Image (tube, rainbow, N blue to C red):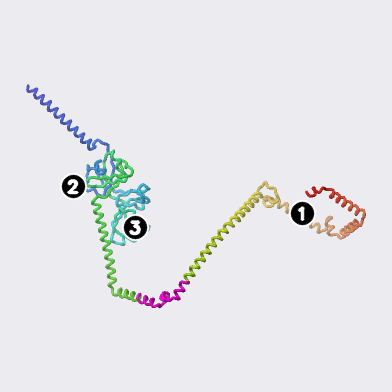
Amino acid sequence: MARKDDTRLNIIVGLFVFGFGALFMLSLIIIGMGKGTFKEKVVIDADFRSVSGLKKGSPVQLEGIEIGVVEDRSFVELDYSCNPASEDRGRYGGGRTDDCDSQMFCAPEGKCAELEHYSANKELHPPCDEDIQCNEEEVCVTSDFRRRYRRVGWTGSTGVCAAYETQHKRIRVRLRIFAESLQHVRTDSRASVSQNGLLGDQLVQISAGRGEPVKAGARIQTNPSLIEDVLAVRDRIEGMFVQVEETVGGIATLAAALGDEKTVRNVQGLLSNANEISRQIAEGKGLVGALLNDEAYVQDFGATLRSVRDTASGLDSFVKRAKSSMTKVDENLQPLIDDGRSVIANIDGILGDLKNPENKSVASKLLYDPDGNMVREIEETVAGLNEVVAALERGEGTMGKLLKDPKAYDDLVKILGNIERNNTIKRLVRFVVEKDEASDAAVPKTRKAE
């Protein structure tokens, strides 16, 4: 009987332990599901200057809603690329880029940079108007630079050269967040280290942006912590004190110069000379006084001004007439130019025809005779003519004898005289002439008109 009671007790205890364990496991599963233990997670990075109080397992919130935890922290030294032409220039969405963290600007070599702290030593910050006037790894802090990079801290004056640094030491914080929450983290989201309540632990707070969603493994930019903001304000206050000290020093130097006896005498002399010049002008002495007090000078000056005005009016009229004449010349010159171009085109066509090898005209042969045949023929003809002329001059042949032999000339005269005295020949000539006249009279008038 006692053995049965022990068995029953053991069964009851075993069931109780099994039920308690199952209930405990179910509670763990419910709690894990509530905290997203079994949800898919992704990793993104954020680089901070300081992470005081932040540790592994610290919560990560998106606008106050917990979306993950801090997985790891590590020291890194790296640079960030940027585009100097579009960084912080223009409007968002219009080609503007924002690849540099707060208090950084895009250096000319395409790297995000930080300005070194302003030094009161003016020799380290020479004046400038543009970057080319500064040394390497220096930038000219102008008014345009200050307007473009308003987040960059600078306590010095504008128009001076300042050194910068492109290699940065940061603490890279790896954030493991829910994959379903990654769509709310955008390219313009910013991470900052804040405090969970007044006395709570440190956490990472991410702002919701409006840009494109970031991808897993990407890096989001960060905002300075409260301590960094306080230090920045302190630096600005110190810079203001430095400027005040410089201003006070300038005033003290001016006061010391004014307290010098020699300077006082020089100032008094200048004032005395100014008073004397004013008195002489008021009395009409000197050229300036005469100009200001003599009515004749005033009238002459007025006449001179009127002459200048009339001359300017005449010059303007001349310019208008010249412009009109140039317009007419341009209108008349253009047809002449067109005619000249047409004539030149015709000449060019004629020359082209003359150059054509198929052209057999005399002009073409005279102008373009590559073999020299025409020249040789002309030379042979001229040589023949020279020989004929020489023969005539020597009295050779019939023509030569007629030209050189007087007897032949006398015989020709006698023959012509005999012909003139011969009646038979006269009647024959008269008959032929009358026959030609009768033939002309028989032709119809219409044909004659044609």
Image coordinates of residue 321 in percent, x first then y, are 54, 62
Q: What whole-number distance in Å separates the C-alpha atoms at marks 2 and 1?
A: 134 Å
Mark yes or no: residue 175 visible.
yes
Q: Earlier in the sequence, mark 2 or mark 1?
A: 2
Q: Sequence-wise, which precedes: disc 2 or disc 3? A: 3
- Label 3 belongs to which residue? 143
The segment highlighted magenta reads 274-303
Front position in the image: 273 or 295: 295
- Circle 2 packing at 10 Å, graded few (<14), some (14-19), many (20+), is few
Residue at position x 37%, y 48% from top? 94
Q: CA distance from mark 2 to mark 3?
A: 42 Å
In the depicted view, which residue is nearer to us: 414 or 191?
191
Three-letter code, disc 3: Ser
Please give the name of the residue rendered at 58% of the width and 55% of the height, measured from the top-left corner: 334
Label 1 sits on residue? 384
Q: Identify residue for label 2.
A: 199
- Residue kind at label 1, given as amino acid type: Gly
**Mark 2 touches mark 3? (CB < 8 Å):** no
User: What predominant SS class does the magenta segment belong to?
Assistant: helix
